[in-house]
Image (cartoon, rainbow, N blue to C red):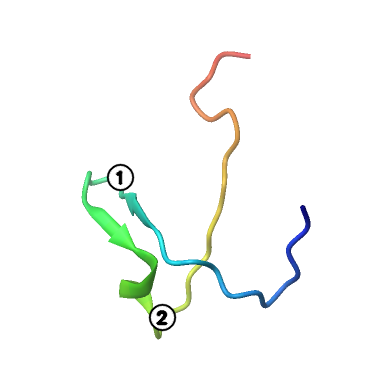
C-alpha cells in the first residue's frame, strides 16, 4: 500500500523515550518527522 507525499496522517498516540504519551494532534503547528526503525533492538 503506497501513500503519497502530503497525505494527512491519522491522529495517533505513542509513548516517548521518557515514557510520556505524545499525540500527533498535540504537535499541530510544529514540524513533525515520523521515523520508523524496523527491527530496532533486535539481534541480527
- Is residue 35 depicted above or below 4 in this figure? above
Measuring from the top left, give residue 38's x and y in whole percent.
60, 35
Measuring from the top left, give residue 26's x and y in whole percent.
30, 73
Secondary element under disc 2, as helix, strand or loop, is loop
Measuring from the top left, give residue 36's x and y in whole percent.
57, 46
Return the residue nearer the eye: 6 or 18. 6
Residue, disc 1: 17
Q: CA distance from mark 2 to mark 1?
A: 19 Å
| Residue at figure coordinates x 65%, y 74% from the top left | 7
Q: Residues within 10 Å of mark 2 (few under 14, many from 20)?
A: few
Secondary element under disc 1, as helix, strand or loop, is loop
| Residue at figure coordinates x 41%, y 80% from the top left | 30
Q: Residues within 10 Å of mark 1 (few under 14, many from 20)?
A: few
- Name the quadrant containing residue 37: top right
Q: Of all residues shown, which one is farthest toward the top?
A: 43
- Is residue 17 depicted above or below 3 in this figure? above
| Left or right: 14 as drawn, with respect to 37 | left
| Residue at figure coordinates x 63%, y 14% from the top left | 44
Residue, disc 2: 30
| Left or right: 34 as drawn, with respect to 16 | right
Amino acid at each position: 500500500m503506497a501513500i503519497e507525499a502530503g497525505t494527512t496522517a491519522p491522529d495517533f498516540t505513542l509513548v516517548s523515550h521518557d515514557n510520556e504519551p505524545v499525540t500527533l494532534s498535540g504537535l499541530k503547528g510544529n514540524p513533525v518527522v515520523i521515523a520508523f526503525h524496523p527491527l530496532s533492538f533486535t539481534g541480527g
